[in-house]
């Protein structure tokens, strides 16, 4: 190899070394969160960063989704359509022409309770990952068994789905709000509306008929407003918990493993990233050494040319 080629190889290996080193520390950090965050029950979990385990269910309001390419019933989907362009290795330079990810919430249920999962911003490990090829911008059928000729088709499809009933581990930020807070807001709105018809309010709640509402009578007004709002809402105690994207940079992960399986997976991936970092660092050092020692005159000439404007 000529010195310019060796320097180019060294630069490529160095960039790859930095990438895998970053992956190693990222995976190691995520492994620590998975191992050190205690498992919580949905019913008793405190708000903040949590680790939950349970089975996935469709949201009562949204139901199951249909994936765009394979038309599978699922709770979450992500897809990509690519077309082959000229250039690249053996003409296999793929260009993305269409992609999308669902944002519809779904439910996580453990032995005690259930909560919503908002998938926006999550790293999701799918239960099904499909890659296949075809002749049209949209597939004309489900994924077929790959053959040698199928790889020559001009379009490549990738689809990931997460299906109902899957047991998962979720790392994310738990927030509880919704119905209780909404009831308080509705009570205030109802009271404001009632105050606009003072005559009707006095006729209904002015027990001593003095033309004013004292403290106890206002308490009765508030109680009546709350009872009316709760009757419309159907419950007085319901609380909806939502796990979503974190606000302080912790991993937001949905994975079809139990806690121990997730930790083992992250350890394996971190070990592979560390091994790749060491190999690529060695290749970088080897390339630099060969570039400096092979053909010294050519190396010096190349360095002079590179320094010239």
Image (cartoon, rainbow, N blue to C red):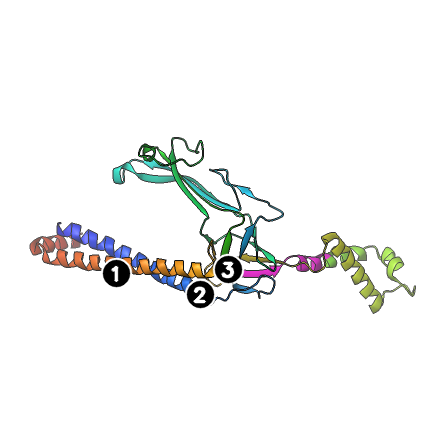
Residue bearing mark 1: 278
Callouts 1 and 2 close, C-beta under 8 Å: no
101 versus 153 height, above or below:
below
126 versus 89 height, above or below:
below
Residue bearing mark 3: 172
Whether residue 161 can be seen here: yes
For marks 3 and 2 on the same chain, the one whose residue lies earlier in the sequence: 2
Q: Tell me: 223 left or right of 68.
A: right
**Rounded to the nearest whole Å, what is the CA distance between mark 1 and mark 3?**
32 Å
Single out the residue that lies furthest toward the right. 209
Q: Which mark is residue 251?
A: none
Single out the residue that lies furthest toward the bottom. 215
- Given residues 23 and 109, the one toward you in this image is 109
Residue span colored magenta: 173-186
Whether residue 305 can be seen here: no
| SS assignment at label 2 | helix
């Amino acid at each position: 190899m000529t010195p310019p080629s060796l320097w180019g190889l060294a630069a490529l290996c160095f960039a790859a070394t930095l990438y895998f080193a970053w992956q190693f520390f990222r995976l190691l950090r995520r492994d620590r969160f998975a191992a050190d965050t205690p498992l919580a029950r949905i019913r008793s979990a405190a708000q903040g960063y949590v680790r939950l385990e349970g089975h996935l269910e469709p949201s009562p309001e949204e139901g199951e989704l249909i994936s765009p390419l394979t038309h599978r019933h699922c709770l979450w989907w992500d897809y990509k359509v690519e077309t082959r362009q000229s250039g690249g290795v053996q003409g296999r330079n793929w260009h993305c022409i269409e992609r999308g990810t669902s944002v519809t919430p779904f439910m996580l249920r453990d032995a005690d309770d259930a909560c919503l999962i908002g998938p926006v911003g999550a790293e999701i490990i799918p239960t099904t990952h499909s890659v296949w090829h075809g002749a049209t911008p949209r597939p004309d059928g489900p994924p077929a068994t790959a053959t040698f000729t199928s790889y020559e088709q001009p379009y490549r499809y990738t689809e990931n789905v997460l299906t109902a009933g899957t047991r998962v581990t979720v790392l994310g930020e738990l927030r509880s709000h919704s119905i209780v807070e909404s009831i308080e807001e509705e009570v205030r709105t109802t009271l404001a509306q009632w105050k606009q018809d003072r005559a009707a309010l006095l006729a209904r709640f002015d027990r001593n008929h003095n033309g004013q509402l004292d403290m106890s009578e206002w308490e009765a007004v508030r109680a009546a407003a709350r009872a009316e709002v709760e009757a419309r809402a159907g419950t007085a105690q319901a609380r909806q918990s939502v796990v979503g994207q974190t606000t302080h940079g912790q991993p937001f992960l949905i994975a079809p493993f139990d806690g121990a399986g997730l930790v083992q997976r992250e350890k394996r991936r971190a070990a592979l990233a560390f091994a790749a970092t060491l190999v690529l660092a060695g290749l970088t050092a080897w390339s630099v050494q060969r570039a400096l020692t092979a053909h010294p005159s050519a190396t010096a000439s190349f360095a002079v040319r590179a320094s010239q404007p």
